[in-house]
């Protein structure tokens, strides 16, 4: 997104925060394509037969975003950082509901180690990842946010650095530490060098 478009989104976000009802539709039109790309990135790591589609995820996430009380959007980057978190929650809630409705919901799930290591995982255990990220957040909020932005937001290390206001070196170091912590948390030591390379 160009600088002028980014400034436009930021201006519209401030109008939404000020209670301008007309701004919500304008915002939707301004951010829809990017939100759809974000949703598609989420689904690249999901089952191919997922019952929730990218368009439905965008609409549900958008409604949650614009209906949040007391949020003062700082800028476009802030909006998309929160969008990644909202999409994470929508997907996890959907996974929980599906698991509750299906017998033997634990069968055939991909171990979290493979999820964290492989960028093209198709059967993501979102519930396990969400639980691990909550534990990580209690220990290191920034590492948890980096994983969330990289994994659910599909952002590059450079984009994460810009969003969080830290250096690229910090993001890459924290990303490495967070992956190692997540692997230890689930007790799965099946990681291999070729898998690690897929994230670089």
Image (cartoon, rainbow, N blue to C red):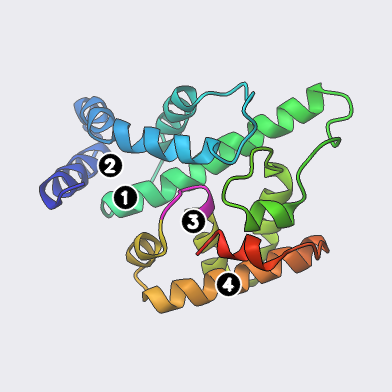
Question: Going by the picture, which residue comes out furthest to the left?
Answer: 4
**Residue that label 3 marks:** 150
Q: Secondary structure at mark 3?
A: helix
User: In terms of sequence position, does the residue under pointer 2 or pointer 1 come before the other?
Assistant: 2
Q: Quote the CA–CA distance across marks 3 and 1.
A: 23 Å
Marks 3 and 1 close (CB-CB < 8 Å): no
Marks 3 and 2 close (CB-CB < 8 Å): no
**Residue that label 4 marks:** 176
Marks 3 and 4 close (CB-CB < 8 Å): no
Q: Is residue 175 above or below residue 22?
A: below
Marks 2 and 1 close (CB-CB < 8 Å): yes
Q: Nearer the viewer, mark 3 or mark 1?
A: 3
**Residue that label 1 marks:** 72
Seen at 61% across and 36% down, the residue is 46
Q: Position of residue 35 (x, y in %)?
A: 37, 36
Q: Position of residue 77 (x, y in %)?
A: 31, 53
Q: Which residues are magenta?
A: 151-155
């Amino acid at each position: 997104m160009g600088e002028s478009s980014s400034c436009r989104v930021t201006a519209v976000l401030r109008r939404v925060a000020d209670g301008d009802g007309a701004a919500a539709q304008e915002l939707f039109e301004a951010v829809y394509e990017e939100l759809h790309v974000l949703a598609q990135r989420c689904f690249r790591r999901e089952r191919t037969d997922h019952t929730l589609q990218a368009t439905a995820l965008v609409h549900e996430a958008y409604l949650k975003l614009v209906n949040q009380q007391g949020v003062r959007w700082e800028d476009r980057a802030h909006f998309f950082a929160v969008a990644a978190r909202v999409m994470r929650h929508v997907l996890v809630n959907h996974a929980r509901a599906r698991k509750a409705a299906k017998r033997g919901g634990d069968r055939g799930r991909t171990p979290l180690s493979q999820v964290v290591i492989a960028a093209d995982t198709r059967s993501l255990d979102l519930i396990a990842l969400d639980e691990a990220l909550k534990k990580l957040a209690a220990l290191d909020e920034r590492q948890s946010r980096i994983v969330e932005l990289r994994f659910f937001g599909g952002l590059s290390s450079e984009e994460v650095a810009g969003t969080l206001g830290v250096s690229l070196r910090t993001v890459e170091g924290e990303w490495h530490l967070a992956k190692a912590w997540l692997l230890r948390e689930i007790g799965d030591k099946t990681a291999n060098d070729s898998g690690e390379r897929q994230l670089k």
